[in-house]
Amino acid sequence: MNELLDLTKVPESDRIAFYGALFALAFADDSIDKEEVELIFSVMELEGMSEVGRRQVQSYIIEPPSLWACLRALSIANEQLRYSLMINLVDTAWANDELDSNEEEGIILAQRELNISYEQLEAIKQFIQKVREIRVRGLDDNYAADALKTATAGLTAVGVPVAAIWFSGSVIGLSAAGITSGLAGLGALIGIGGMIPGIGVAILLGTGIFMGVNALLDTGDKSKKAQHQAEKERKAQLVIKNMQGAINQLVEQISSLQERATKLEASAAEAEANQEAIRLLTERLKFIQQSVNKRKQAYGVA
């Protein structure tokens, strides 16, 4: 399936399960790191969802859902959605450069529930490794373009639809002059002329390291440049909005725990557990606030 998936047509329950699975895997080692949070929130697209649905996804930063339940809910979902989730799960697992044994088990569970073959999972792992390598190398025109084409060819060789990348966040964070040639290669691979808009936007947006958009999009088409700039700003606003929603829920939860600590006569063990919960939530609150501030500065958002 090479048609790009329209996110607004994906059932809300599937979108909730998709993001829930990412949070669940990130928490598999009983903690969640700043890198994992930033990656997940950069992927999240909650536009068009109900207020209840948005709050549910944002609340996963406090308490994640069951990974198995989320995967089971998506076991017969749209093909692109399933492959995109697998790509994002692998990327999330490696976000902090460590792979916990529980995260490994989560990846194996996802492979089974999402009906991903061993060969496809291996190709996805290689793709993510290459993407992460490009991120670390930074701006290297030829290398980034060639590496992206090679890594993507590895996916198509085992039947992973390239269009699934458009719906995933695995390429977010890449920023390389000359990447358009890599994108043109992707377009040729799946029979779409020129650059795939979704993948192009994902790569160009990045997560606060957006660089050289004029050079990247210098095709002589000013309207296309304006369109990409508008999409960059829209995505930045959405990421900040989603993070702010999570911040609000964290503040509410911390306040509730603090109020409980002062009103209830708890046992020493319960009081200690309550304080530990407050500490963990405050830590998450802090690095999400830092991430929001970084994005506001990067994109000139007030």
Image: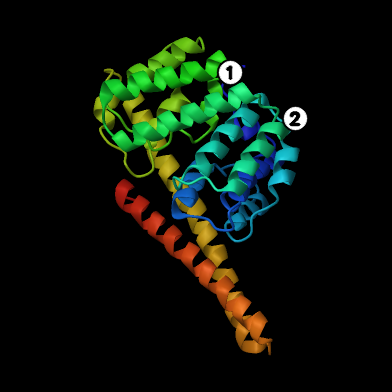
Do we see residue 232 in this rendering? yes
- Residue 273 position, x and y percent, is 62, 76
Q: Is residue 144 above or below residue 236?
A: above
**117 or 58, which is in the foreground?**
117
- Residue 210 position, x and y percent, is 31, 38
The residue located at (55%, 65%) in the rendering is: 250
| Circle 2 SS class | loop
- Whether label 1 touches label 2, CB < 8 Å: no
Question: Badge 2 is on which residue?
Answer: 76
Question: Badge 1 is on which residue?
Answer: 3
Q: Is residue 269 above or below residue 30?
A: below
The residue located at (64%, 47%) in the rendering is: 20
Name the amino acid, label 1.
Answer: Glu
| Circle 1 SS class | loop
- Residue 289 position, x and y percent, is 42, 61
Name the amino acid, label 2.
Answer: Ile
Q: Is residue 141 left or right of residue 255?
A: left
Mark 2: few, some, or many residues within 10 Å (few <14, many ≥20)?
Answer: few
Tell which circle, 1 or 2, labels the residue nearer the N-terminal end: 1
The label nearer to you, 1 versus 2, is: 2
**48 or 131, which is in the foreground?**
131
Name the quadrant of the N terminus.
top right
The residue located at (53%, 24%) in the rendering is: 123
Q: Is residue 118 above or below residue 8?
A: above
**97 or 246, which is in the foreground?**
97
The residue located at (70%, 50%) in the rendering is: 66
Mark 1: few, some, or many residues within 10 Å (few <14, many ≥20)?
Answer: few
